């Protein structure tokens, strides 16, 4: 799927849009996405909420995986939170590790605008088409 088509497809991801997530770069099996942190992203302790990080990572995976031209959904996600952050921007870089007919494996690294690695997500995807 070309970049324009993948961007058009994900315009319909209303949850990601509501979270402020934007696609920066996309290529087959790779994507970079980000969001600008707002008070709505913080937990009660004043750090970016883990669910916001998970959503960013899952979305970056979806963009990268679907850019292959196949319709792929998450089958299993595992996220490791490495550092709490109060950064102004979070960036997720997703890339394919391996792919077979029905199952694929991706890694997503999430960093803040200060260059600190915040979390890492491992995703198993399932190909619907």
Image: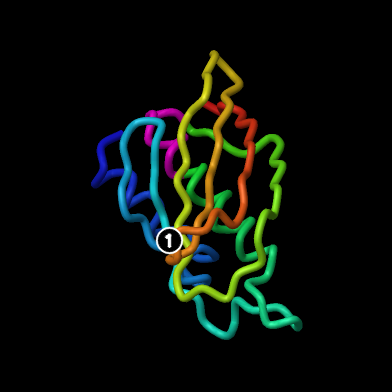
Percent from the top left, x then y, of residue 95? 46, 34
Q: Residues within 10 Å of mark 1 (few under 14, many from 20)?
A: many
Q: Quadrant of residue 40?
A: bottom right
**Front residue of 23 and 122:** 122
From the viewer's perspective, tell me whether residue 27 is left or right of residue 85: left
Task: Say which residue appears at 44% left-offset and 28% top-offset.
Answer: 70
Percent from the top left, x then y, of residue 110? 53, 53
**Front residue of 87 and 99:** 87
Q: In this view, does 11 lie above or below 26?
A: below
Q: How many labels does the image show?
A: 1
Colour scheme shown: rainbow
Q: Residue at the top extreme?
A: 101
Q: Residue at the right extreme?
A: 44
Q: Quadrant of the N terminus?
A: top left
Q: In this view, does 72 lie above or below 114?
A: above
Q: Quadrant of residue 47?
A: bottom right
From the viewer's perspective, tell me whether residue 27 is left or right of residue 56: left
From the viewer's perspective, tell me whether residue 24 is left or right of residue 29: left
Instruction: Write the start and end of the magenta stretch as one range.
Output: 63-70
Task: Say which residue appears at 51% left-offset and 73% top-offset.
Answer: 87
Find disc 1 in the rendering and name its residue: 34
Task: Say which residue appears at 39% left-offset and 62% top-offset.
Answer: 22
Q: Is residue 15 magenta?
A: no
Q: Quadrant of residue 75?
A: top right
Q: Is mark 1 on a helix, strand or loop?
A: strand
Percent from the top left, x then y, of residue 109? 53, 46
Task: Say which residue appears at 71% left-offset and 37% top-offset.
Answer: 76
């Amino acid at each position: 799927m070309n970049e324009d088509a993948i961007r058009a497809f994900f315009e319909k991801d209303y949850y990601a849009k509501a979270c402020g997530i934007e696609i920066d770069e996309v290529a087959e099996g790779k994507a970079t996405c980000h969001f600008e942190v707002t008070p709505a992203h913080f937990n009660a302790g004043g750090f970016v909420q883990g669910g916001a990080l998970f959503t960013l990572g899952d979305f970056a995976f979806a963009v990268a995986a679907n850019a292959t031209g196949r319709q792929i959904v998450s089958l299993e996600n595992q996220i490791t939170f490495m550092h709490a952050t109060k950064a102004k921007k979070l960036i997720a870089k997703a890339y394919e590790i391996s792919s077979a007919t029905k199952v694929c494996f991706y890694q997503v690294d999430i960093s803040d605008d200060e260059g600190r690695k915040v979390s890492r997500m491992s995703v198993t995807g399932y190909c619907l088409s």
